[in-house]
Image: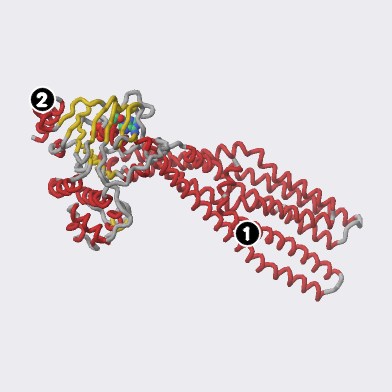
Amino acid sequence: MLTTLLAYARPGRRALMASVAAGVAVSACYIGQSLLLTLAVARGLRGDMTDAVLACCAALAVVPVRAVLVWAREVTAARAAEQVKTELRLHLYRHLLTLGPGHTTQQHTGAVLTTLQDSVEALDRFVSVFLPQVLVSVLGALGIVAVLTVIDPPVAVLVAVTAVLAAAAPRLLRHRMRRYRIAYMHGWRDLSADYLDAVQGLTTLKAVGAHERFAARLFQGAWDFYRSSLRFTQIATVSAGFVGFFAALGTAAAVGLAAWQYASGELALPAVFALLLLSREAFRPVTDLMGAFHAGQTALPAHAAIRELLDAEPAVPDTGTNAVPRTDAPPHVVVDGLRYTYPGQGRPALDDVSLTLEVGTTTAVVGPSGSGKSTLARLLLRFADPDAGTITADGTDLRELRLADWHSRIAVVSQDVFIFHGTVRDNIAFGRADADHADIENAARAAHAHDFITALPEGYDTVIGERGLRLSGGQRQRLAIARALLADAPLLILDEATSSVDIAAEQAVTEALERLCAGRTVLVIAHRLSAVADADHLVVLTDGRVVEAAAPRQLLTRNGAYARLVARQRAGAA
Ligand SMILES: Nc1ncnc2c1ncn2[C@@H]1O[C@H](COP(=O)(O)OP(=O)(O)OP(=O)(O)O)[C@@H](O)[C@H]1O
């Protein structure tokens, strides 16, 4: 465990060593001050007042030096922690990307977020406080014991033994402390995830009248978290009490032994004074280390959460080696005998599904809710691999292609258009990083988005997203189409792309989509059958199986599943 935790600290190595050096110098300052004060007492007792005052002044002069060193220690330790956290967050985010969207749908998004934010943050104290303090305490304690040995070996032995006992005593409680700390971190993680749900799902909770019930659940979670945090504080206080007890005992015993030696004439008064000061200082490294140990404890459960994320395997291995040919030509995609069951589900979501996306044509997939339409899109995007069957693009199995290559050939427009915090321009340019303003504007015009964009307060520079201006469903949809137009991918997946568009915007969005689809291989998933009436080919899925496939007009004349779906939708609309 410690070695893995140490591995996290690697990016901040230099800053850490600088912090340790400053920490050791601080300890040296304490020893130096004690010795200078002892010198002042010795000179004072001899009546040499000038030397005594000079020694006192020197002891005072150490104070600002020590303050500068403490500042250097804190700053370099904080720098080390920031370097470690930045590196780790980047590493975790990259890993999350390799895990793919499948991971966040299976895991609680809030929990993943807590790992990325809080667990990484929890390593801060481990790196900036605990790690340097271990070395500083060991070196500091050895230094003081060495000085004590020169002055009075028996006192040195006594202090060394009690210091070791003080450091070891809290180990008696270590199992309980670890348990409480893990409960504390898990409580925090669950609470954060619930709060995220509560904020993201506020509208739904209100709409279904479940907000009071959810509030009660949040209250219960907060109460559980309060109890676990209190339990941890109590046990940490007891452990700090052990250290305090041995420190007081050690100091008292050392001073008692020194006084006894003075009474029996074995020790001079200045030496007793030095022993008094130094034996108190000898326990500072232990108490500092215990404080740092408690601060660093949060790293244990944080490490477990980080490890869990890092150990998660991607849903699909990116082991393909075939490069996609550098061509803008729309691909010929063949889905053959596809079967896929979600992990933990008994029934397959897709069963023996075969269909062909002909080059430059539009294929629509329709079917009742839960029939497997989105699952087909997921497999086409290789967010998961099929249990049986294959998907080939221009004759090559998707598993043989490099994931990034394959994804660069696909653009997706779905019903949930994610708007990132940034300008309208940035949001469109997500489709292609090197696009200039003319490219962006052309894409926006083709997507029927230019007019509404120029009507925004700052046109293309208007900030949108979570913390900016909110757009309507139709506006978001047209932005997504502009994004896809700019990306210019030869394979297009439209997943319920017009479902959140109001009647007023439907015409504009439909025209924009027609432009987008022209000359590409397209898969359209739609509930609204009017949206797919012009498709070249139509596949009807029911319970994960293909029940009909032909041109839409042909299917209407067959009076089968498609005709029934159309009739039902017309009746519903009427
Ligand atoms: N992440 C998941 N984990 C487990 N089962 C899932 C998951 N996603 C979908 N399913 C199940 O797989 C089946 C097919 O779902 P899918 O979302 O592909 O249907 P759909 O036709 O797209 O539905 P809709 O039209 O409502 O979007 C359903 O039974 C669904 O419950």
Pinpoint residue 544: horizontal percent, then vertical percent.
26, 27
For the residue carrying disc 2, how many other residues have a C-alpha within 10 Å: few (<14), some (14-19), or many (20+)?
A: few
Please, what secondary structure does the residue beneath circle 2 have? Answer: loop
User: Which of the pair 371/514 is nearer the observer?
Assistant: 514
Q: Is residue 40 left or right of residue 333?
A: right
User: In which quadrant is the C terminus drawn?
Assistant: top left
Vertical position of residue 477 compared to residue 62: above or below: above
Q: In the rendered view, would you say 8 is above or below 573? A: below
For residue 184, the mark is: none
Extreme bottom residue here? 50
Which residue position holds label 1? 18
Task: Return the residue at label 2.
Answer: 559
Pick the front one: 539 or 508: 539
The residue depicted at 29 percent of the width and 46 percent of the height is 327
Residue 227 percent location from the top left of the image: 50, 40
Q: Is residue 336 above or below residue 445?
A: above
Give the CA separation, mark 2 to mark 1: 80 Å
Figure quadrant, ligand 1? top left
- Residue 118 placement, left or right of 274: left
Q: Earlier in the sequence, mark 2 or mark 1?
A: 1
**Callout 1 amino acid:** Ala
- Identify which residue is drawn at 27% across, 27% down: 353
Is any part of residue 192 visible from this angle? no
Q: Is residue 124 visible?
A: yes
Q: How is the image coloured?
A: secondary structure
Residue projecting furthest to the top: 346
Q: Position of residue 146 (x, y in %)?
A: 79, 55
Is the CB–ligand 1 distance for label 2 below 8 Å? no
